[in-house]
Every structure is written in structure tokens, then in C-alpha cells.
Amino acid sequence: MTDGMALAPLGLGLAALGRPAYITAGRGDDLGRERSVEALRERAHAMLDAAWARGIRFIDAARSYGRAEEFLGSWLAAHPERRAELTIESKWGYEYVGGWRMNAEVHERKEHSLAMLERQWPETLAALGGAPDLYLVHSLTPDSPALGDHALLGRLRGLAASGVRVGVSTSGPRQGEALGAARELPGSPFTVVQATWNLLEPSAGPALARAHDAGWIVVVKEAVANGRLTPAGNDGAAEALAVRLGEPLDALALGAARAQPWADVVLSGAVTADQLDANLASTRSSPPTDAAAFAALAEEAATYWAARRSRPWT
């Protein structure tokens, strides 16, 4: 049921495909025990093929997603004719430090500095075989030094002038504040945002609407809340609502995100073709009668993000 609305298209996010451990519920069942570089490269390529065959043309990666950029780059090298039809997004400001270990004490490290950008930008170019279309500061928060580093902002303006669309991704309970600060910078280089929005954590919605109205590209991540809004998440209230509305929970969650009028792209974090097909079935835009039921699922932002920080890497 679409009620005549045009829903945001899906993109494929590689966060769960580029490294052996991540925080998605049910990941062990999805991937099994084999997490070698070769196994995940093969799976990433298969998922990229599946996404391409299903009409998905937006791919998201990041320096911190293990070897995601490398896997994407080798797939692009094997299919150079596809590049012109794709929008490739990547991010800098985090680095993967897990050493390809499931039990690493620390999996990624954040640093929003000019030195990090100058190191990671060439790494991105080498891994992808060229420049991404969109390049974002990874997980901007209101206290990020990136917001006040004039040399860094100047470098980002230079990237934007070269034709790369520069932006931010946001995380944490103050996403709206961080996005507002990025938009209001004098001479802001930013015109893209990737933010968490889902039925459990919709607090960034008003800020995302303002960004969209200002001409920014708005990309939604974590629409299924790292698996909480899937059957593997064991969220009783959300499951009950999905049953009442007659839809699979993950399709309901993706459909709610895709129906937001400010959403330009909603990312799927699928790691199997079946999951991707289920995500693509999210064609329902919620009628007004569901608004109260959806709102009842929302948690306090601080509560949601505290629970997310405590999720195990599996």
C-alpha cells in the first residue's frame, strides 16, 4: 500500500559486510562462522551483484567498515561499465582497528582532524579506484572539533569545489543539534547528511526535514535499528504492531523510513539476498491511523543510544 506516495529508494550499506564483527542482531545466523577476508569479499561481491540486479544504485561505505571500500573497489574494477550509474558514498573520521578479530577489544577509533582526513582521503581513492560521489565526516556530534577547525573546513571546501559532495553523518542523542551546527556554519561545505532514523529513534526527523528543505541530500541509516526492528530483534511491541498491520516487521520499519517526505535514500544493511528482497518489499507508507501506534514505539533518544552502545559485536 503506497497511498500514491513516491517512496525513497533503497541503497545498500556495507557496514555489516566489510568486517567480521558488527552489532546487528542475528548476524551469527546470517553469516555463519566463516568470517575470513576471502569469505566476506565473496559475500560482499554477491550482495553488490544482487543489489545491482534489483535496481539499487546507491552504495554506502566508510573507512571504518573494515575492507568495505576495498571490496567495493574490486567489484567496481570488475564491472567498470556500472560506475556511471552508481552513487557511491563513503566516510572518513573513523578507522578500523579491529585487526580482523571477532573479539577485538576496540573495533574502531574516531578522530575528526585534518591529519586524519589527509590520510584517509588517499586511502579511499586507492580502495575505490577513484573518488566517491559523496564524502562525509563520520559520526559528527555537537562537540566534534571538525565544526571549529578552520583548516579542516577549508580543505573540505576544496573537496566540494572539486566536484565531491561533502557532508556529515550523525549519531548519538543530539543528532539534530549536530546537523544544525553543520548547516549553520558560515560558508559551510556540507550539503549531505546521513542520519539514524527509525521507529524507535525518530528524534532527528525535524532537523532532517529542515536540511532537506535547504537542498541537502538526506540519507537514512539504521532504519531497522541494527536488527532490533526485525524478527531477530525480539521487540515485542514492534512485532505486535507488525502482526496487527499484516506486514513483516523489517518491511514495516523500512517502509516507515522510506515514507518520510524528507528522505532521499534509505539504506539497507542486508547481508543476504533474501534480506534484500524483504527490504525491497517495504512499499507501505503508513496511513494517518498508524501515526499514534508508530509514535508509541519511540524511545527517549538517550535511552536508545545507551542501549545501542551496549550491543555486542558478533
Image (spheres, grey):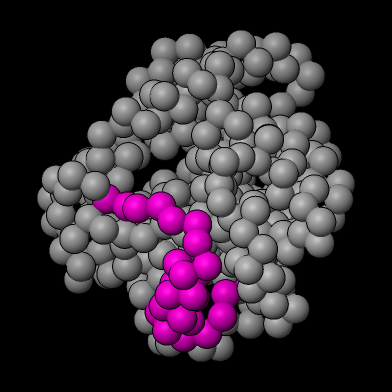
- Residue in view at x 34 percent, y 53 percent: 109
Q: Establish if 167 lies above or below 125.
A: above
Q: Which x, y percent locates residue 65?
A: 37, 59
Give residue 293's quadrant in the image. top right
- Residue in view at x 18 percent, y 44 percent: 105
Relative side of 296 to 292, left or right: left
Q: Is residue 10 visible?
A: no
Give residue 255's quadrant in the image. top right
Relative side of 108 to 185, left or right: left
Towards the viewer: 129 or 227:
129
Magenta region: 107-133
Location of the N terminus by quadrant is: top right
Location of the C terminus by quadrant is: top left
Question: Is 3 part of what is drawn in magenta?
Answer: no
Q: Which x, y percent locates residue 168?
A: 62, 54
- Residue in view at x 37 percent, y 31 percent: 309
Q: Is residue 106 visible?
A: yes
